[in-house]
Image (cartoon, coloured by chain):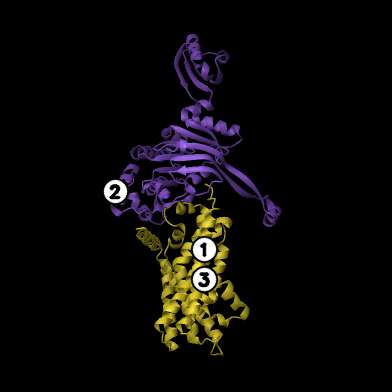
Amino acid sequence: MSAQSSAIVLAQGLSKTYRIAEKQPGLKGTFRHLLRRRYRDLEAVKGIHFAIEEGEMVGFLGPNGAGKTTTLKMLSGLIHPSGGELLVAGARPQRRQAGFLQDITLVMGNKQQLIWDLPPWDSIRVNAAVYGIPEGVMQRRVRELADLLELGEELHRPVRKLSLGQRMKAELLTSLLHEPRVLFLDEPTLGLDVTAQGRVRDFLATYNRRTGATILLTSHYMGDITALCERVLLIHEGSLFHDGPLGELTSRLAPHRQVRLELQHAQPREVFESFGTVESHQEHQVQLLVPREQLTETVAALLGRFDVLDLEVSDPPIEDLMRSLFQQAGVSET
Amino acid sequence: MRRSRTLRTVLQFWRSSLEAESEYQLNLVLECLAVSGNLAGSLFVLSLLFSGQSSLGGWDWNEALIVLGLYTLLDGFTSCLLQPNLSKIVNHVQQGTLDFVLLKPVDSQLWLSLRCFSPWGIPALLAGVVLVVLGLQRSGTVVHGDGLVLGAVLLVSGAAILYSLWFSLAALSIWFVKVWNATEVLRYTLVAGRYPVSAYPPALRLVFVFVLPVAFMTTVPSQALLGQGSWPWAAGSVLMACGSLLASRWFWRFALRHYTSASS
């Protein structure tokens, strides 16, 4: 571990195996399950390695059941790893020491800690007491965070009367009151509309810039990842598939680039087949997939042969790449 | 420093839970009605048990009132603290919100045991005190200082044993998730404590002393208030309370090692 001791999050050979009771359907299966249970081991995380430096914002990607949430729960000390080494903010998370818990926070898009019948202010006061934050400091931090999150009188309204977006913003405020150094965010924009998603993204970017907090973010919305994270970890069936810049992941997943042409004169589809894979063809518009290493000469040849009004080169959308990767592996993404 | 933070936390817990409960004012009326109904029912059954005889297992009517009073007091304590907190542990495990408790730099057992304070147990607490005072007055008992201390020690020990049993049963939800039935059975077994243990058949008496220590919660403290207690009993009761508290603590830590957290 010493080689990467400056990392604020360090996982080496991290693994987690769950023992799961299996039950056949139907009444017969239920009786068998009652009398003689059958268990099997499910390897949710299979010996993954990664290190995150202080202040980094890292996206954590993978389809449902890939092991993202299990990893986040091990990083935050909620569940014990089955194997490997883990250090977060200099502590072993599973020991759940007070100093470590003071340094981290975990925000889950599908669960909330706010008291349902009371305004967020009451939950904020409970957290201030739990984290030992003096009244004056609490007031100042709430003011700053509420400004960033554009929260005002919502903090005085019962949680049950708030919209999903307002609740998530209040949840973020409450979770960040103790100024944690490491933020684990599990689907923080889940179910939010486009505007609310944008606000949460803007807030996270600003918070990271202002405080230098380290953020590990999982999301099914690629927009969250592309807007916030330069680096991504891609986990698939419990193994780490990629650790590096988002652009590198795109190159790795897509050995082709997309070339879109707008032509002066319509051309038949066949003439483009020697340049690459024709994705779509309409009279004046053509979309091709061209191998990355042949891109320069192909573009030059296209410009030389046809009257081109417009030409655009891009990577295929990351959503499409992820979907095809997960489908190739027989895993459906939601 | 740490102690004052814990105290501030518990006070804030209770403040917020009182505020949340006050959203439902009708509960106070319903709880007063429930306590009155329960008390009337218990007194009626007690009067049936006494019909045609002046003693029940060696206890006269006024002494039996003291046992009923201590039971009502304990029931009030259960409604104020045990029921609203310990019954939520199963929900926390099932819904995955135990995660939020475990993420806080505060003792998780303390949080789960003291997070809520329900004012709806207060009518039962008051009714219990009234019944005990009435029973003592009518039986002409003068409670001396040592009898009062002995009774209080025994009552607190009984409450601690009850808490430990309940908490440990609720902790089983880490493995079995749905353990409502077990905790409900425990609560309803305690109803046996509203009458002197000697009023039950010998086999049940053994159960209420050695298996579910109902006898230690109401009958033994009542004897102490009536001047029939003994310090060795009190010492034994305190030892048992400390042992069960430590056991519940150890069991909770052991259970957490097996916590897998609900899936998202």
Tell me the subunit letter for badge 3: B
**Front-most of residues A259 and B173:** B173
Q: Is residue A113 visible?
A: no
Colour chosen for chain B:
yellow
The label number, if any, that marks residue A140 in the structure image: 2
Look at the image and give the colour of chain A: purple
Determine if marks 1 and 2 fall on one subunit.
no
Q: Is B88 above or below relative to A154? A: below
Visible residue check, residue A300: yes
Q: Amino acid at mark 3?
A: Met
> B22 or A22, which is in the foreground?
A22
Measure how far apart labels 3 and 2 are at the Cα level: 48 Å
* Gap in angstroms between the C-alphas marked 1 and 3: 12 Å
Q: Residues within 10 Å of mark 2 (few under 14, many from 20)?
A: few
Work out which quarter of the rendered image holds the N terminus of chain B and state it: bottom left
* Chain of the residue on which disc 2 is drawn: A
Secondary structure beneath disc 1? helix
Residue B189 at x, y = what percent?
56, 72
Q: Which residue is mark 1?
A: B248
Q: CA distance from mark 1 to mark 2?
A: 40 Å
Residue position for label 3: B240
Mark 3 lies on a secondary structure that is: helix
Q: Earlier in the sequence, mark 1 or mark 3?
A: 3
What is the quadrant of residue A229 in the picture?
A: top left
Q: Is residue B131 left or right of residue B259?
A: left
**Which dot, 1 or 3, sits closer to the camera?**
3
State if disc 2 and disc 3 touch (CB < 8 Å): no
State which mark lies toward you, 1 or 2: 1
